[in-house]
Image: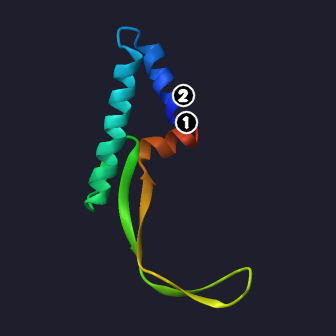
């Protein structure tokens, strides 16, 4: 599902809300999650999962095309851990 499909589904299920309001709500939620992670915080949505930031140390990598060694800088990457309810639902236990 992509962002526009999510917005459309929420708008269809809530006919009392305008499409532009649903779009603003979805954008706000995503922005708040992004801002919290950018600040180094963890975002937990009960029953769904938790978003966090993991640090990857600098290392020496290898260019797969040429085989030569390259220095890869330290970086921070987003990480998602699925919640118990989501895992159970995916595995058909609920």
| Image position, residue 66 (x, y; %) | 73, 85
Question: Residue drawn at (44%, 55%), measured in percent from left and top?
Answer: 80
Q: Which residue is mark 1?
A: 2
| Image position, residue 88 (x, y; %) | 50, 42
Residue lying at the far top of the rendered structure: 16
Would residue 45 be seen by someone viewing this image from the given angle? no
The correct choice, above or below, for 86 with respect to 80 in the image is above
Disc 2 and disc 1 in contact, CB within 8 angstroms: yes
SS of the residue under disc 1: loop
Question: Residue drawn at (29%, 51%), measured in percent from left and top?
Answer: 35
Image quarter in which the N terminus is found: top right
> Which one is in front, 68 or 55?
68
Would residue 47 be seen by someone viewing this image from the given angle? yes
Q: Is residue 15 left or right of residue 33?
A: right
Q: Residues within 10 Å of mark 1 (few under 14, many from 20)?
A: few
Q: How many marks?
A: 2
| Image position, residue 59 (x, y; %) | 49, 86
């Amino acid at each position: 599902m992509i962002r526009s499909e999510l917005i459309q589904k929420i708008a269809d299920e809530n006919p009392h809300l305008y499409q532009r309001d649903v779009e603003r709500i979805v954008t706000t939620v995503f922005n708040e999650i992004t801002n919290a992670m950018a600040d180094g915080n963890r975002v937990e949505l009960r029953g769904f999962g938790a978003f966090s930031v993991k640090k990857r140390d600098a290392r020496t990598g290898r260019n797969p095309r040429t085989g030569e060694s390259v220095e890869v800088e330290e970086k921070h990457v987003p990480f998602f851990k699925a919640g118990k309810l989501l895992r159970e639902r995916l595995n058909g236990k609920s």
